[in-house]
Every structure is written in C-alpha cells, then in structure tokens.
Amino acid sequence: MGTEQVMYTVGSDLVMVDDIPFPPHISKTKQLSLLGHGLTDIEIHYLQIKFTAIGVYLEPEIVEHLQQWKGKAAKELAEDDNFFEALISAPVEKFLRIVVIKEIKGSQYGVQLESAVRDRLAADDKYEEEEELALEKVVEFFQSCYLKKDSVITVFFPSNSSTAEIGLTTEGKDESKITVENANVVEMMKKWYLGGTSAVSPTTISSLANSLSVELSTNDY
C-alpha cells in the first residue's frame, strides 16, 4: 500500500463544484491537473438527490495518448466511448476526489460500487471467485463508516499498474485506505467512474470532454 501523501495546491483559483472547492492541481508521484468535474446523484424515495461532487485529476501528458481525437468537438468526444477507453488505458496517473454532499451510510456506497462493477464484470464474463473476493473487501472497507457531508473518498490509479488505492476521510478521523489488487475489478472501477456514456456521472464525462477537446486543440505532440 502506498504511503505517499496527496499534496493539494492551495490558492484562490479553486474550482467550485456545487459549493465544494476543488484544488486545480494535486500531487501524487507527479503533479496532476483537474481536467473534469461534476456531480453524481442518487434516487431516494423517487427523488433525485445530489450525492457527491467529483473531480478527476490526470497527468497533463494524457493528451499525448489521445492524438487521434485532435480537432474533435467536445460533444463528439463525450459520446465516443472509444475515446474514454483510450483515456482509461493510457499509462498515466489518474486520481479521483469525491466529496459527499448528501450523507449516506458507507455500506450503501460500497454496495453501489460493488453492484456497478459486478454487472460490468458479468457482462464481460470476467466475474470469478477472485473478483468476488476483491469486491467483498471493498464492501467491508465501507461497511462500518458513515459518510457525513464533506467526507472525502479518493481513488488513485497509478500509471502502468493494475491496482487501485481507495482512501476515505471522515470528520474527526484519520484517513483509512485499502488497495484493490484484482486487475479486472480495477478496470471496471475505472469504467464506472470514467467510462464515457456508461459512467456514473454524465456531468463529469461532459466536463472531461470539454477540457480535453481544448487541450488537444492547443497542444502539439
């Protein structure tokens, strides 16, 4: 399990997502830029409730791996799942910062994540005992916590690695972490958060498409 700390850039240029501030850059082993942000919602008693604000941090070098989409409009990118497949598979660090808006039991979040990943694995005929055990570990991680407003979930995907590190910070407690080491589960976690038209947050996908369309048009590689 990685022990490096996430460093947040503090300044006046914070990006506000539904009144929640996101720093424009964070550092893991490299400095990553906030290239997409949005909201997730959840249905509670037939009402759609804002659930989390999400920020997607990527190495700026991500555009090197997306050159075939240079010149494409943001709307076109947002609807192109092949574009997001390329983004997911690009060997760059990816970091998600997810801030809770509507408090919820950790077990509910864990089950939501488990269900989404399991369905994707089953559809690709990749759901075996190893994947089931890895998902159970994730559910157990969230089981005992209560996600109050402003709790922070982080998901870090290192470059050239088939692991994911999930972090959780809740009020008054030190950050707890878990490492997911099953490559199939990690792949489907990436698809749940970043997988184009099937991702959990359409607003985040639209934001990523907008940012990357601009980056691709202004950078030459």
Image: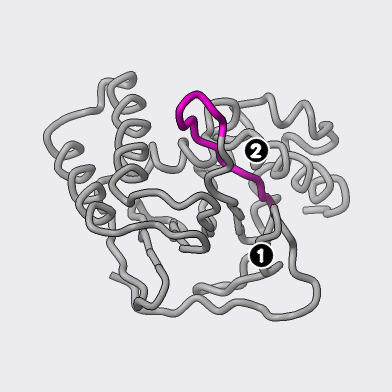
Q: Position of residue 175 (x, y in %)?
A: 36, 73
Which mark identifies residue 205?
2
- At x 36% / y 40%, what residue is drawn? 113
Q: Is residue 169 left or right of residue 61?
A: left
State whether residue 103 is above or below residue 80: below
Label 2: which secondary element: helix
Mark 2 or 1: in front is 1
Q: Looking at numbered disc 2 in the image, what kind of residue is underneath it?
A: Ile
Q: Position of residue 80 (x, y in %)?
A: 66, 25
Say whether residue 108 is magenta: no
Q: Looking at numbered disc 1 in the image, what kind of residue is underneath it?
A: Phe
Label 1: which secondary element: strand
Q: Nearer the viewer, residue 123 or 116?
A: 116
User: Which image quadrant for residue 26?
Assistant: bottom right
Q: Position of residue 108 (x, y in %)?
A: 33, 42
User: Which image quadrant for residue 203?
Assistant: top right
